[in-house]
Every structure is written in C-alpha cells, then in structure tokens.
Image (cartoon, helix red, strand yellow):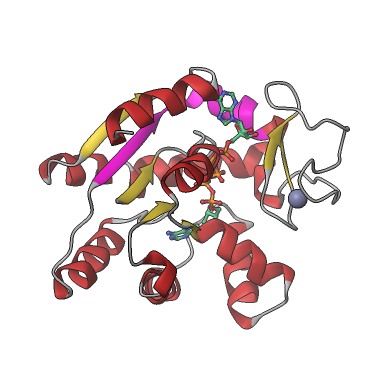
Amino acid sequence: MKIIMLGAPGAGKGTQAKQIAAKYSIPHISTGDIFRANIKNGTELGKKAKEYMDQGLLVPDELTCDLVMDRIAQDDAKNGFVLDGFPRTIPQAEALDAALTKIGQSMDYAIDVDVPDENIINRMSGRRACLNCGATYHIVSIPPKKEGVCDTCGSQLVLRDDDKPETVKKRLDVYHDQTQPLIEYYKGKDILKSVDGTQPMEKVFEDITAILGA
Ligand code: AP5
Ligand code: ZN
C-alpha cells in the first residue's frame, strides 16, 4: 500500500503516519525527519536545508525529489510506504508520479488530515519533539510520562526551531500557496480521502483505518 499524508503543518501527519507504518508494516518516510537528521549530523544537505526550514520556507525541489526517489527504491519500500511531508508542491507530485509510472506503479491513497489554521498555531507551540528518535508529543493533549523526556528513548525533548509562532505563520502561508493545490491534484486522480484532523488522535486513526481497510 502506497500512501501520501497531506495536511497543513501541525495537522498531525507525522502522528498518524507512524501508526499507519506500524499497523501495515510499511516504512514511514518523512522528508522533515530526514532533513532534521541531516541538520543534527551537520551534513552538507542539512546545512542547505536549515537555511530554508528556519525561515518557514520549502527546501528547493531539486534537493528534495532525488532524496525521496532513492528512499522509495530501497528494499524495505517494495511493499509500500507512507510518505509524510512529501510531495509538497505540484512539481514534486509530478516527479513522484513519473518515477512510479516508470516501474508500472502508482500511489493508492492521498489522505488529507484537515485542521483549520486556528488550531494549528496552538498545536505547534505545544509540540515537543525528540530529535533523537523522531517521537512527538504535545504538552497538553499528548504529554510524555516525564516532563521534557522522550518516553521511547529517554532523550531531552525540544521545541523545534521552526515551531516559533512567527515561523509557523509563514509555514501556513507557504502551505496554502504551494501545498494545498495538491488536494485538487489528487482529487483529479481519484485517490484523495479526507479525515477530520481536529478529533482526538485515536479517532483520526480509526477514520484512516476505515479508509485503508484492516
Ligand atoms: P515537516 O517536518 O514535514 O513539517 P510539517 O509538514 O510542517 O509538519 P509537522 O511535522 O510540523 O506537523 P505534522 O502534520 O507531522 O504534525 P504532528 O503529527 O507532529 O517539514 C519541516 C520543514 O522541512 C518544512 O517547513 C520545509 O522547510 C522542509 N520540508 C519537508 N519536506 C519538504 C518537501 N517535501 N519539500 C520542501 N521542503 C520540505 O502533530 C503536531 C502536534 O499536534 C504534535 O504536538 C502532536 O502531538 C499534536 N497532535 C497530533 N494529532 C493531534 C490530535 N488529533 N489532537 C491533538 N493534538 C494532536
Ligand atoms: Zn526519543
């Protein structure tokens, strides 16, 4: 099963994608996580990506597309994958389709996790992330067992650099401008499904599994 998670920054794409990956035994491929791992390790890609991410801008398509195409060509993605944060522009969606068409495949679902802008700012300011294992929490709705510490790996939790309110506003503008058009794009391909992302995360996951099947 090949799935795309769509939705505004902070809509809960990552939270849901991790659960989908576990339930359907497919890899969770998050471009944001890949960039953050590169920043943490001080790679050239990380240095370039950080300049854009800290301003709330998208990393250029030429730095993003090849990275994803290489990743989905790996062995563990043979039976499917869940893409989180990619594609984010029409050219990225076209690049993905072209790569899959070449091998006689296509995406199965694009799931739009719908959350209005008003809810987003609050979610982002409360998000705490583990830069070591990628787990995410929310100080009110999904708190870690011990304040500031990752349940999974014990590392210190942080507020992401791009979760500051000014940057979140910019990311929302960029989302409406460059990423939201993908909803029409996938509607046109007849694979778009929408879920109400304002519900508790367990309910959102239930709605998603009702779409994907057991
Ligand atoms: P990325 O990491 O992809 O960020 P994003 O799309 O902005 O998404 P987020 O990770 O912020 O949110 P999410 O929807 O995954 O929500 P989450 O589950 O964490 O990208 C970061 C940057 O990298 C981009 O700005 C860009 O610069 C660059 N980039 C990445 N991909 C790119 C690409 N393809 N092209 C170009 N540039 C790219 O949830 C948010 C919070 O809400 C959490 O605290 C969570 O615990 C909480 N929460 C989740 N679900 C619920 C719920 N149902 N109820 C209450 N709280 C909830
Ligand atoms: Zn962790």
> Residue 54 lies in what quarter of the image?
bottom right
Does the magenta-highlighted stretch encompass residue 118?
A: yes
> Residue 113 lies in what quarter of the image?
top left
Q: Which residues are magenta?
A: 109-124
Residue 45 horizontal/vertical position (percent)? 58, 77
Q: Nearer the viewer, residue 104 or 22?
A: 22
Residue 188 horizontal/vertical position (percent)? 11, 43
Q: Nearer the viewer, residue 42 or 213?
A: 213
Quick check: 144 left or right of 196?
Answer: right
Quick check: 156 left or right of 136?
Answer: right
Is 208 rendered above or below residue 42?
above
Q: Measuring 39% from the left and 65% from the top, which residue is drawn there?
A: 77
Q: Measuring 66% from the left and 52% from the top, which residue is drawn there?
A: 134
Q: Measuring 36% from the left and 74% from the top, which residue is drawn there?
A: 73
Is 41 rendered above or below residue 209?
below
The reply to whether residue 115 is in sight is: no
Number of dots carrying numbers? 0
Q: Nearer the viewer, residue 100 or 160?
A: 100
Image quarter (top left, top right, bottom left or bottom right) of the C terminus: top left
Residue 177 horizontal/vertical position (percent)? 35, 45
Q: Measuring 40% from the left and 54% from the top, which residue is drawn there?
A: 83
The reply to whether residue 108 is in sight is: yes
Residue 201 horizontal/vertical position (percent)? 53, 25
